[in-house]
Amino acid sequence: MSDDIQLIVQAINKAAETDVIKDYIYPMLSGITFTLLAAGTAYFTVKHQERKQQHIAANLAKLKASNKLILSAQSALLNVITIKQAYILDLPSDPILRMLNIGQVECNYPLLDLPLEDFSFLSPSIDEIDHASWENLAKIAVLMKNYNATLGAWSKRNRFEDEVKMAILSVHGQKVIEPEISIETIIDAASAFKVGIAVDLNERSIELTDVIINDLHSFLTEFPKAVRPHIDVNAIKGYGKIIQYGNMAESFNEIMLAKTPSADWEEYTKFMKGKSTGK
């Protein structure tokens, strides 16, 4: 056998001894598999982080909206308490004197008007709605509407009270502030119609104030507990907490939450009936 032929035979034998899959294909597949696994791991890690950040952002939005509502309700409660403090400790029983004794009431406070869509996460299905719970968006909407209506009632009442008082002052001077002034004297100076409107608005404003103070107190006590199950507090630990309502002194609460004593309508009603019949 010539040397050339022998070299060819040796090359063929060496090639036959080589494991193509082991030496060429497997390393190539291993490299591709590792690359795909690394890419897949990176992809799912990024997606997991994105979902985590979205979850945190969603719960932070819930926390922010809830705390804003709680702080707004606290401010609203302080406003109506300030209004009630102006008259509760010195309130006559006669309806007209009550109105004049209270005088002008500061009621130029911001309205309670927050977008309810921020609290859509509270909305249960129709079958799960608890009308007594502060998870009920309709109840929260009514709370804000009633607070705004209370401020509106006091503002309108102030206007009529001022008209009555100015009419009396123009006739009787400073005697308007004296408790001895009679119903007849007041009505003769200001007209039964105007006095009747002022008195009605005064009593309605007092009643609305009693109701809204209790409603706001209830909301501030119960809402932080009602909203908690809807917020993943563990996911946003370190970012903030749900604001808790700190009750006022018990003796103060008793006065503010108690119903204002009703007016004594007997003499007023008797006199107004007499005016209407011309007696």
Image (cartoon, rainbow, N blue to C red):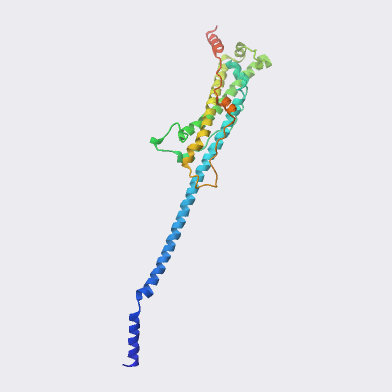
In the figure, 19 relative to 103: above or below? below
Q: Is residue 165 left or right of residue 219?
A: right
The front one of 162 and 105 is 105
Is residue 120 visible to the viewer in this orientation of the structure? no
Residue farthest toward the bottom in the current orientation of the protein: 2
In this rendering, is residue 93 above or below 250? above
Extreme-right residue of the structure: 174
Residue 12 position in % (x across, y down): 33, 84
Pick the front one: 58 or 100: 58
Question: Can the viewer see residue 54?
Answer: yes
Q: Position of residue 50 (x, y in %)?
A: 47, 53
Query: Which residue is at the far top?
Result: 279
Report how many numbered discs are placed on residues in the image: 0
What residue lies at 41% left-to-right and 64% top-to-bottom?
Answer: 36
Quadrant of the rendering where the C terminus is positioned: top right
The one nearer the camera, 22 or 197, is: 22
- Give coordinates of residue 65: x percent, y percent: 52, 41
Residue drawn 56% across the image and 23% down it: 206
Compared to 20, does 203 lie above or below? above
Identify the residue at image location x=48%, y=50%. 54
Residue 256: where, in percent of width, then height?
57, 26
Q: Nearer the viewer, residue 166 or 155?
A: 155
Q: Quadrant of residue 267?
A: top right
Q: Quadrant of residue 90?
A: top right
Task: Say whether residue 108 is left or right of residue 24.
Answer: right
